[in-house]
Amino acid sequence: MAINISLKELLQSGAHFGHQARRWNPKMAPYLYGVEEGVHIFDLTKTKEALEEALQFLTQTVKENKVVLLVGTKKQAKDKVKEIALACGIPYVSERWLGGTLTNFEEIRRSIARLKESKEKMAKGEYAKFTKKERLLIERDMERMERFLGGISELTGKPDVLFVVDTHKEIGAVKEASKMGVTLVGIVDSNSDPTLIDYPIPMNDDAAKAVEYVLDLVKEAILAGKKKVKKVESSK
């Protein structure tokens, strides 16, 4: 069943506003309607089409038991990214993309193992014998690692798909995914290069309401894929 995408909702959330016309990437031209008061305006019918295609792909990906990693660290998106990822049970990055997350995953895996080991020791009270200052330093280190690695702590290898909010800001993640052969789905604003993304969603990536609306649709698509997996498994 196709997910219902509302053009009215996209319009009301401000998804149609691009950046100032002078700050644009000419490769975005096919997705733009024109310029109003010096600002590029997206053709929302094309946004809707691209979004439909991206959501169908996400549902199929999850249905095939493949892994989707959600990435969005900008202020307008980070809380929603974490909320959606936790609701769907998928890995996420909402604080900062650490260089080498995909290209040097073994190093990241070691850091995740260290975090898990520290948590276990803390739970067992093994740090009780340390001084107050030493425990404080350990706790701060754990908090920092949890902030940056907590969302990918269950990731055992490279994901199959990266969903990126603001492909311009997260160019490091985009380049790593491309290098590692990970399929890219992402929100591309008028200053972005859509040719780097396998499933570009052309729209405003700064409007919190627009980003939240799209992420809610992403949640719907992923959960639809998981539901299909459960149906297949229960019929065996």
Image (cartoon, rainbow, N blue to C red):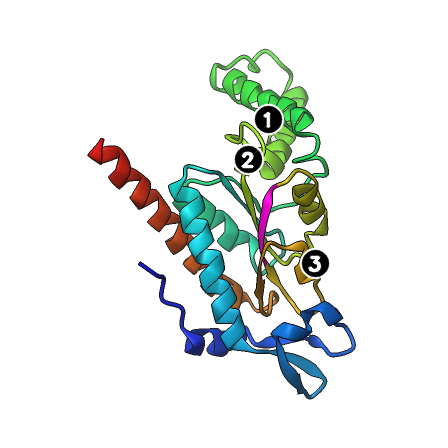
Classify mark 3: helix, strand or loop: loop
Q: Position of residue 157 (x, y in %)?
A: 57, 29
The numbered mark at residue 112 is 1
At label 1, counting other C-alpha atoms closer than 10 Å, the crowd grade (few under 14, some 14-19, many 20 or more) is: many
Residue 79 is inside the magenta segment: no
Q: Are marks 2 and 1 in contact (CB under 8 Å)?
A: yes
Residue ID at (30%, 45%): 227
Is residue 47 depicted above or below 184 in this figure?
below
Q: Position of residue 176 (x, y in %)?
A: 69, 42
Residue 56 sits in quarter? bottom left
Structural distance between the alpha carbons of marks 1 and 3? 27 Å
- Residue, far bottom: 37
Q: Quadrant of the C terminus?
A: top left
Residue drawn 62% across the image and 25% down it = 109
Would you call the spot at circle 2 few (<14 residues within 10 Å), some (14-19), or many (20 or more)?
A: some
Q: For numbered disc 1, what is the local secondary structure?
A: helix
User: What percent of the width, then of the height, locates residue 114?
Assistant: 61, 21
Which image quarter is the N terminus in? Answer: bottom left
Type of residue at label 3? His
Judge by depth and name the residue closer to the eye, 25 or 39.
25
Question: Which residue corresponds to mark 3?
Answer: 168
Disc 2 versus disc 3: distance between alpha carbons? 22 Å
Amino acid at the residue labelled 1: Ile
Chain part drawn in magenta: 182-186
Sequence-wise, which precedes: disc 2 or disc 3?
2
- Residue at which label 2 appears: 152
Callout 3 environment at 10 Å: few (<14), some (14 to 19), or many (20+)? many
Kindly report the distance in space between the C-alpha atoms of the residues bearing marks 2 and 1: 8 Å
